């Protein structure tokens, strides 16, 4: 009698774990298959031009470092555009010397960074905005292998 109960219990345990075992086998097999559905999205796979808008107001002390920092990650066709807004210093001159496209806006009635966004080139697919006094601590963009 005890042997029969042990056999029935064993069979029930096997039956209860079969769906979990099947799921584990399916997941293991799927992880070994080539990932044809997933596309790698990194900095090298972006194939459209990016405009980086850098609104700046009297940032002559920091603008060159900001441009050099962004230029280290820029690709062919990307645009670094400094919008020198109501500047009374050499922000525009230093930004141009560092390699950025510069747009000077001298309108004291317009204030804030919103004015800079209107300067984007219409054919650009994507834009990013960066504070004129900022920089990143090195080129962290992945390199293609």
Image: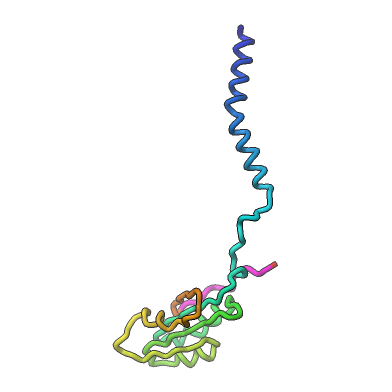
Q: Is residue 116 magenta?
A: no
| Residue 98: quarter of image | bottom right
Query: Which residue occupies 62% across, 68% down?
Result: 142
Residue at far right of view? 145
Along the line of sight, which residue is nearer the eye, 109 or 39? Answer: 39
**Where residue 41 sits: x, y (%)?**
59, 64
Along the line of sight, which residue is nearer the eye, 29 or 143? Answer: 29
Query: Which residue occupies 64% across, 10% down?
Result: 3
Q: Identify the colour scheme used.
A: rainbow
Query: Which residue occupies 58% across, 75% down?
Result: 73
Quadrant the N terminus occupies: top right
Quadrant the C terminus occupies: bottom right
In the image, taking residue 46 as reference, residue 63 lies left or right, namely left
Q: Is residue 138 magenta?
A: yes
| Residue 14: quarter of image | top right
Q: Main secondary structure of the magenta part?
A: loop
Along the line of sight, which residue is nearer the eye, 55 or 139? Answer: 55
**Where residue 9 sits: x, y (%)?**
59, 17
**Where residue 104 sits: x, y (%)?**
42, 90
Judge whether 2 appears above or below 100 on screen.
above
Boundaries of the magenta span: 134-144
**Where residue 26 sits: x, y (%)?**
64, 40
């Amino acid at each position: 009698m005890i042997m029969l109960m042990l056999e029935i219990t064993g069979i029930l345990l096997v039956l209860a774990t079969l769906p979990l075992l099947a799921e584990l086998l399916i997941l293991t097999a799927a992880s070994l298959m080539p990932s044809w559905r997933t596309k790698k999205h990194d900095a090298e796979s972006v194939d459209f031009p990016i405009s980086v808008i850098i609104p700046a107001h009297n940032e002559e002390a920091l603008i060159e470092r900001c441009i050099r920092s962004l230029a280290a990650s820029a690709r062919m066709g990307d645009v670094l555009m400094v919008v020198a807004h109501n500047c009374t210093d050499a922000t525009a001159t230093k930004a141009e010397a560092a390699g950025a496209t510069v747009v000077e806006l001298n309108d004291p009635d317009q204030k804030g960074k919103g004015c800079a966004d209107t300067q984007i080139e219409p054919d650009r697919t994507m834009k990013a905005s960066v504070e004129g006094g900022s920089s990143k601590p090195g080129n962290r963009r992945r390199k293609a292998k």
